[in-house]
Image (tube, rainbow, N blue to C red):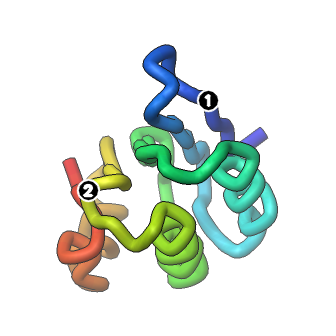
Amino acid sequence: MKVTSRLQDNGKEVVIEINGRFDFSLQKEFRDAYQKHDGGLSYRVNLENTEYMDSSALGMLLLLREHAGNVTHRIRLVGANRAVRKILDVANFDKLFAIA
């Protein structure tokens, strides 16, 4: 499985991990990873093991943001390598997401 998710012990944050290529082929898997949890939660998307990201992945992150109520601080993108971070920067995602 390339996308995994789990609810943190505090019951307030969902951690979604992306392994390998984050592209259109993961659309259903990524959507299922956050939709199986109730709304009103925060999300941490761990990109530590993400080697590539394309424009459809950016779109999926925007759908997650919409699911989270379009609240910037509810979603953190963490662990992106240099190439993935560059894609996020070019897309100005630092204005829409907390990136660490």
Tell which circle, 1 or 2, labels the residue nearer the N-terminal end.
1
* Disc 1 crowd, CA 10 A, few/some/many (<14, 14-19, 20+): some
Identify the secondary structure beneath mark 1.
Answer: strand
Q: Where 11 falls versus 88 (above or below)?
A: above
Mark carried by residue 6? 1
Task: Tell me the element at label 2.
Answer: helix
In percent of width and height, residue 91 lies at 30, 84
Q: Nearer the viewer, residue 40 or 83?
A: 40
Residue nearer the viewer, 32 or 25: 32
Q: Residue at x 48, y 40 (%)?
A: 49
Is 73 positioned to the left or the right of 20 in the image? Answer: left
Relative placement, left or right, of 36 versus 97 is: right
Quarter of the rendering containing residue 1? top right
Which three-letter amino acid code belongs to the residue tagged 2?
Answer: His
Query: In the image, residue 16 lies at what x, y percent?
Result: 55, 42
What residue is shown with label 2? 73
Name the residue: 33% across, 75% down.
87
Residue at left offset 56%, top offset 74%: 63
Query: Spatial distance from mark 1 to mark 2, Cα to Cα?
Result: 19 Å
Q: Position of residue 33 (x, y in %)?
A: 69, 48
Q: Which quadrant of the view contains residue 70?
A: bottom left
Vertical placement of residue 19 versus 72, above or below: above
